[in-house]
Image (cartoon, grey):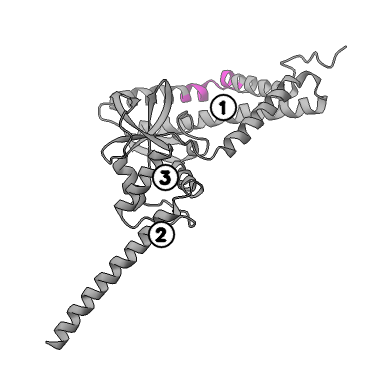
Amino acid sequence: RKSHLFFIIKSVSIIYFKRIFIAIMAATTKEFYDPDENLQKLCDFLRSSEGPAVREAIEMDKRVYYIKGEKLVNFLVEPKKGSKWPKELPRFKSRPDAIAVCKELCNRQYMHRSEKVGKGELEVSRVRDFDESAYFTWIYEGNKKFSHLMTTMLIIGFLCCTCFPIWPNFLKVFVWYMSVSLLIFIFFLVTFRGLLFLFIWIIGYECWFLPNLFDESLGFFESFVPLLSIEKTKDGQLVYRMGVAVAFFSFCYWAVTQPSEFDGFVKGQGDFIKDLYAGTLLSDMSQKD
């Protein structure tokens, strides 16, 4: 009986002290996010690529990003797999703590509540309170240092381009070579992606090298992820794949059996590239009197 009573007292004590510890941690977390500086650091993390997934919509003729309240709270309590929580920010131990901070985000106008009025369209809600079942649009756009830097670089680049006629000749030659090299690289990259897709599509799979390369909705670095994507083709494309295969291999047969015509085509392309690098396709009148 004594051992049983001791076990009960020990269990109750552990539960009691655990609740005290959780309450202390919750108070500490809430106090930490009271200053705007720390709350802004949290917003920087939430608006980064490590933060929760958001959706795009149009609100007041402007493209905005929104998220459901429940998903935001879930992310704060248990971040998505692979997300790196900043070391300088304390983690949330319970949903009430996360909800309290979300309310502060609304009160301090880092985000506002919105309502859906159509497909891809939102309007500002008259209700301001935070609710997990509602949608919230980000007002805070994140750290703008990189954006300001890129804007400055864009202005400087524009001014340099407008002064191109008075550049010294060696700079003109350097820019010309860089432009031609970039143009040729893009051409061969697009050609390589197309041929790779064609070869593998014929055998029943869709394979793209850098599938998000030309996705305008993604950022610069996100456009290069993933490196490769492979999916099985949809049913009903066998006839089209066979037709493309016949046309492609017919072209290859023609190129092999008609070397004089194909070699002339290759030689013409080579001469064109040489003329590009030599700068003989465009006249330069800025260095003439």
SS class, disc 3: loop
Q: Position of residue 219 (x, y in %)?
A: 50, 35
Q: Is residue 260 one of those drawn in magenta?
A: yes
Q: Which residue is mark 2?
A: 28
Q: Residue furthest left?
A: 1
Q: Nearer the viewer, mark 2 or mark 1?
A: 2
Amino acid at dot 2: Thr
- The kind of secondary structure the magenta stretch mainly shows is helix
For the residue pair 182 and 73, the one nearer the viewer reads as 73
Residue at image point 59% right, 19% down: 265
- Give the extent of the magenta segment: 252-263
Q: Are marks 2 and 3 in contact (CB under 8 Å)?
A: no
Q: Which residue is mark 1?
A: 187
Give the distance between the C-alpha atoms of the residues marked 3 and 1, in whole angstroms.
Answer: 35 Å
Q: Earlier in the sequence, mark 2 or mark 3?
A: 2
Q: Nearer the viewer, mark 3 or mark 1?
A: 3
Neighbor class of circle 2 (other Cα within 10 Å; few <14, some 14-19, many 20+) is few
Q: Position of residue 85 (x, y in %)?
A: 44, 53
Give the distance between the C-alpha atoms of the residues marked 2 and 1, in whole angstroms.
Answer: 57 Å
Q: Position of residue 181 (x, y in %)?
A: 66, 30
Q: Earlier in the sequence, mark 3 or mark 1?
A: 3
Q: Nearer the viewer, mark 2 or mark 3?
A: 2
